[in-house]
Amino acid sequence: QQQVKQSPQSLIVQKGGISIINCAYENTAFDYFPWYQQFPGKGPALLIAIRPDVSEKKEGRFTISFNKSAKQFSLHIMDSQPGDSATYFCAARDYRGSTLGRLYFGRGTQLTVWP
Amino acid sequence: EPEVTQTPSHQVTQMGQEVILRCVPISNHLYFYWYRQILGQKVEFLVSFYNNEISEKSEIFDDQFSVERPDGSNFTLKIRSTKLEDSAMYFCASRESSGNTIYFGEGSWLTVV
């Protein structure tokens, strides 16, 4: 069962363009939604995160839009740069199993930004 | 910036052999995790650990897996008898008890042949 669905699987954007990656979930117990960026051979690194009581969060060129009623959230990368080329994972946290919580990841989006 | 460090970065082992993957979490973090990523697939939760006890484990974390904090700094994942399907990148992660951010290490790539 796929807890977090992510699309598209791959995305090609021209330098300066907007990259948009979408995620959807079913589990209403999720309480925290981070986005991770992963470069080849490296571990996932937190990019930006949002709680479900907020509809939008912006940090520099990165914005999360969150639609609680639709159970969807998306990452927008403005003015995309070649250095943004990486794999992006959305994730959602569930605390029901333990107070440490566990993350459920989407399948990832391979972003390529052409110069 | 403090980071989670993992060793080895890559290990090749024969099927049926035992493997120990090692991690040094960020020093003031109390919550520890192992995740894995099979090549080309999503990152999956294995186990969480706090106060020398497993807090939660996934259906992947069967009797072949165990975790331990043998001293004040290391956190280990042991696979008792490796199978071909255990080939994956294993990520250690940690976070502060009061924070939300989970910090991941660079991973240990395990190849079972």
Image: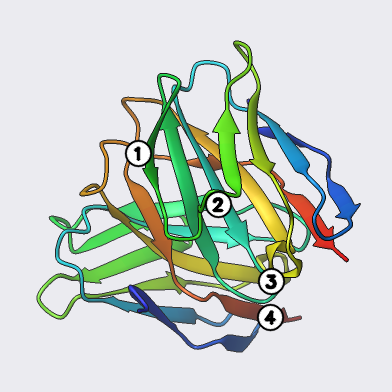
The kind of residue on which mark 4 rests is Thr
- Foreground label between 1 and 2: 2
Residue beneath disc 1: B100
Q: Nearer the viewer, residue A115 or B102?
A: B102
The kind of residue on which mark 2 rests is Tyr
- Whether pointer 2 and pointer 3 mark residues with C-beta atoms closer than 8 Å, the reply is no
- Foreground label between 1 and 4: 1
Indicate the quadrant containing the C terminus of chain B: top left, top right, bottom left or bottom right.
bottom right
Callout 4: SS:
strand
Residue beneath disc 2: B35
Position of B86 with respect to B41 (left or right) is right
- What's the distance in space between the residues labelled 1 and 4, CA to CA? 29 Å
Question: Chain ID for label 2?
Answer: B
Q: Is residue B49 in sight in this rendering?
A: yes
The kind of residue on which mark 3 rests is Ser
Residue beneath disc 3: A85
- Whether pointer 1 and pointer 4 mark residues with C-beta atoms closer than 8 Å, the reply is no
- Whether pointer 1 and pointer 3 mark residues with C-beta atoms closer than 8 Å, the reply is no
